[in-house]
Amino acid sequence: MSTALIVNPEATRVTPELTLAVERELAAAGPVETLLTERPLHAVDLSETLDPGIERLYVFAGDGGFNEVVNGLMRDVPVGFLPGGSTSVLPRALGVPRDPIEAARALVRSSSERSISLGRVNGRRFTFSAGVGLDAELVRRVDALGRESGKRAGDVAFARELLRLFTERRGRFEPAMEVVGVGPVAFALVANGNPYSYMGRIPLRIAPKALFEEGLDLVAPRRLRARTLPEVAWWALAGRGQDRSSKVLYVHDADEIRIVSDRPVPLQVDGEDLGDVTEALFEAERSALRVLVPG
């Protein structure tokens, strides 16, 4: 079996030693061509120009690297995602082991696949989540902290910046955008699967009904107050309540969601800052990607 391995050497948990160990595991199934990314968006080019003889593609990176690969992939080839980032939401949500060597071993020995949907916003694909407003601003703030030894700041930095953001706003988030045909909201979270993200080992189940095999789920608070924060935290941890709350707009299994704003607001996909927008058109690409999962 001919296999390609795309590696982002700058991802938080990727090291030369781990890359060699992953290569050894994958080589059990045949020759492996390893491709290292050298710049932002390089994984888009590498996956777009993938050799037509490749029968399996593996990606050893973080969620940003996974996002780049699915945005460049033009062929129907099964993809195995190996966790190399600080969070690595996608492989964890697919049941892949957190240790990259164990993940490579499990996937190379497996013949199991899932056909999953992808999201798309303003032409950019995403694999598990996207957001307009609050979480996108949080991503931007963490990116502004810079990287230590090329590695992105982790969960502690996200928690600290989130606290600062709430303090600056005095815990108040008023309607700032409109979900067309649904209503005004303070910010919007769009999920392609469940969980939406992780805080350490804890899954954040923002959109508990979301499934990788279905369309998109929208979770958008109408407004947010300091006194409602405990309730919001409970929703995220317990994964229930937000889908039937009068304080939240919840849309399940949508093919299209359109959000507009009178002023530019931040947009993120899979933890990557896409800049400011006044309109975001979300679309579901059903059964868009074959992914390898443990048997």
Image (cartoon, helix red, strand yellow):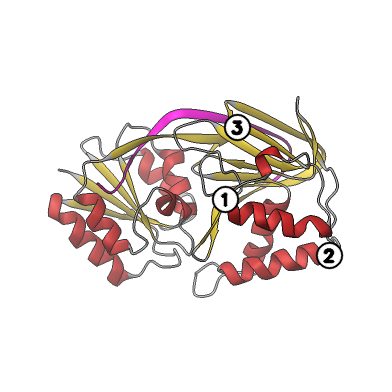
Q: Amino acid at mark 1?
A: Arg
Q: Secondary structure at mark 1?
A: loop
Magenta stretch containing residue 92, yes or no?
A: no
Residue 5 image point, x, y percent: 28, 52
Considering depth in this image, is 190 or 39 the residue closer to the camera? 190
Q: Secondary structure at mark 2?
A: helix
* Residue topped by disc 1: 205
* Quarter in which the N terminus is drawn: top left
Magenta residues, as a range? 275-295
Q: Amino acid at mark 3?
A: His
The vertical placement of 87 against 260, above or below, is below
Label for residue 168? Answer: 2
**Viewer-nearest of labels 2 and 1?**
1
Label for residue 13? Answer: none
* Residue topped by disc 3: 252
Of the numbered discs 3 and 2, the one sitting upstream in the chain is: 2
Q: Residue at x 49, y 61 (%)?
A: 87
Q: Amino acid at mark 2?
A: Glu
Of the numbered discs 3 and 1, the one sitting upstream in the chain is: 1
Left or right: residue 48 versus residue 262 is left
Q: Secondary structure at mark 3?
A: strand
